Amino acid sequence: MGAHIAIKQRLLAQQIETPSWAYGNSGTRFKVFAQPGVPRTVEEKIDDAAQVHAHTGIAPSVALHIPWDKVEDYGKLAKYAESAGIRLGTINANVFQDDDYKLGSVTNPDPRVRRKALDHLLECVDIMDATGSRDLKLWFSDGTNYPGQDDIRERQDRLAEALDAVYARLGANQRMLLEYKLFEPAFYTTDVPDWGTAYAHCLRLGEKAKVCVDTGHHAPGTNIEFIVAFLLREGKLGAFDFNSRFYADDDLMVGAADPFQLFRIMYEVVRGGGYEREAGIAFMLDQCHNIEAKIPGQIRSVCNVQEATAKALLVDREALAEAQLSGDVIAANDVFMDAYSTDVRPILAELREEMGIDPDPVAAYRRSGYQDRINAERVGGNQAGWGA
Ligand SMILES: [Mn+2]
């Protein structure tokens, strides 16, 4: 029981950031399904994010996406979030939705387009100054579709030039998170396709540049926990974008496709010191709820991360080290699997009761009447969604 008290204590320190875009409409390339009650404004997205925090107790911030969440006065928006009980988190740049970016943004062969993309990234840092956000998250859709389309090496030079300029603009307490993605929308080459490329750029840039691991951005079979362990050891893991995938960048609820993988990732986070607040790792969700209800989808996702974390914290590291050092492969695997197989739901229910929230956050949300209220109130106007 003593161990459970210690684990609950550590779980209390957990913070998971939800993304503003998870509350808007989303879909695939084939269809975006609208849902009732979807926010029309960034303030309504903040209200929804605040619900997730109210029911989980561990989602105190919401990430913004620029320009989807563009407003006149970001200081005022930060105050709005505060009054809703949460705060504004990571600023996500968007240099992939303008016609100008057909051949790339910061790696575009046309210097005018590169300048435009860079100006947007710099504007995002201005916004961070106003919102008090620590992190700028950069994901580039840049790449090519055909062999010979553009110079692969030259594009790396252009990327480096843009990253240098953004890095130089960062304040003392601000960071840059560089995200990578295997492919899509570019299908032949991607300019930041993997953690190694992101790591090399971040290493060159300096302390304030870190890698963001989006769990959905790898080839099938990739050992993500190895990447996590390696980046943590090098002091270059900055953040997670959690979601889960079956085939490609599916953006499904984290832990839905492979809860064991999420446990293995969280174990390496704990093992590598990444769970400590001082490590500064941002734990974020990057998901879309295309067919399921959005707010319960976010609540479920936050709980899935919490559950995997509880199991990771349960691993008896002393017994594991002993088995590992004695070369007892079966015993070591037993220790690891014992933690994964533990039903942590009673511990989490206890924790939530101690936090003054319902042991079943999704059920509590359903009972709250919030969804009925927004379904009735949010009529007319333009629902938020991709590109809006
Ligand atoms: Mn992402």
Image (spheres, rainbow, N blue to C red):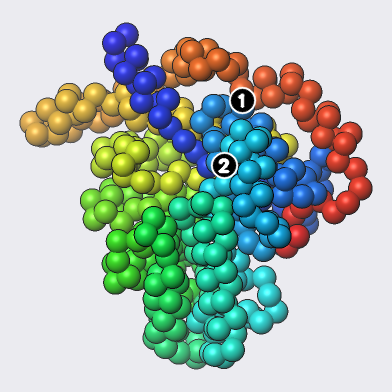
Report the amino acid beneath label 1.
His
Left or right, 236 with reference to 62: left
Seen from the viewer's position, the closer of residues 26 and 246 is 26
Residue at position x 23%, y 51% in the image: 233
Secondary element at image label 1: helix
- Quarter of the rendering containing residue 294: top right
Residue at position x 46%, y 36% in the image: 15
Tell me if I can see residue 308 in this picture: no
Left or right, 18 with reference to 12: right
Q: Is mark 1 within 8 Å of ligand 1?
A: no
Seen from the viewer's position, the closer of residues 134 and 161 is 134
Seen from the viewer's position, the closer of residues 184 and 52 is 52
Image coordinates for residue 65, horizontal then vertical, percent: 62, 57
Residue 46's place in the image compared with 320, above or below, is: below
Image coordinates for residue 317, horizontal then vertical, percent: 21, 28
Residue at label 1?
Answer: 55
Assign the N terminus to one quadrant of the image: top left
Residue at position x 36%, y 46% in the image: 280
Image coordinates for residue 35, horizontal then vertical, percent: 81, 43
User: Do the CB atoms of the residues marked 2 and 1 lie less than 8 Å apart?
Assistant: no
Determine crowd level at label 1: few under 14, some 14-19, many 20+ residues with C-alpha closer than 10 A: many
Report the amino acid beneath label 2.
Arg
Residue 96's place in the image compared with 65, above or below, is: below
- Quarter of the rendering containing residue 7: top left
Tag shown at residue 87: 2
Image coordinates for residue 274, horizontal then vertical, percent: 31, 42
Determine crowd level at label 2: few under 14, some 14-19, many 20+ residues with C-alpha closer than 10 A: many
